[in-house]
Amino acid sequence: METPPPTTPHTEPTDADLATVKEQLGRTPRGTRAIAHRCPCGNPDVVETSPRLPDGTPFPTLYYLTCPRANSAIGTLEADGVMKDMTARLAEDADLAAAYRKAHEDYLERRDQLGVLENFPSAGGMPDRVKCLHVLVAHSLAAGPGVNPLGDEAIGMLPEWWRKGPCVTPPQESQK
């Protein structure tokens, strides 16, 4: 993609946002704290989740990608072996490995501000391998460009998933 989606502010989720995310995921979202990024179409595409679900279960995935179109496109990258190639590059490129370690530290720092999960990894395979591009893309969208180099790189490989319009039709906010 020539121009990645712009960074958007984190916002408190509205009832309409949560209903949209529910439709995107096909299930009720759990532990949602914020909308961490909005797609250029206006829908949420990344949610920030609590480090612990309401029942106390640890949930180490701070940023969760919700857009089914973006998820599908990322699944294609994963099937094409992008994760394996990225992991191999981490072993060969000390600068990339150092930047990816910083992304891991950023992820943990952001999550720890909400609640510390002792002995839990960050996500996506960080800091030593690439296990899930979905998490890396979500981190890049939520944190903005320059924080997660492999997330940024994966975003650059994606089509503009929003060009066809919203992936789901958001429910209307109730009239006051």
Image: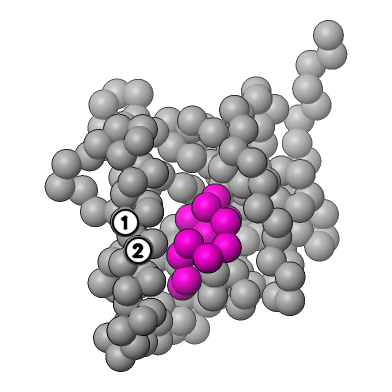
Residue tagged by mark 1? 105
Q: Position of residue 132 (x, y in %)?
A: 40, 65
Question: Which structural element holds mark 1?
Answer: helix
Q: Which residue has dot 2 on it?
A: 102
Q: Let me know if residue 66 is in the magenta part.
A: no
Q: Look at 69% across and 27% down and name the residue there.
A: 16
* Residue 66 position within the rendered picture, expressed as x and y whole percent measured from the top left: 57, 48
The residue shown at (26%, 72%) is 128
Instruction: Determine which quarter of the picture holds residue 113.
Output: top left
Quarter of the picture holding the C terminus: top right
Residue 123: percent from left, percent from top:
33, 56
Residue closest to the far bottom: 92
At 46% from the left edge and 47% from the top edge, which residue is drawn?
63
Image colouring = one colour
Q: Position of residue 78 (x, y in %)?
A: 47, 75
Q: Mark 1 and mark 2 in contact? Answer it, CB < 8 Å.
A: yes
Q: Residue at x 39, y 44 (%)?
A: 110
Q: CA distance from mark 1 to mark 2?
A: 5 Å
Q: Is residue 85 above or below residue 174?
A: below
Quadrant of image for the N terminus? bottom right
**Above/below status of 21 relative to 165:** above
Query: In the picture, residue 60 is in which quadrant?
Result: top left
Residue 85 appears in the picture as rendered: yes
Q: Classify residue 69 by image quadrant.
A: bottom right
**Left or right of 40: which side holds 122?**
left
87 to 167, vertically: above or below? below
Identify the amino acid type marked 1.
Glu
Report the magenta residues as a range: 137-150
Specify the amino acid type for callout 2: Lys
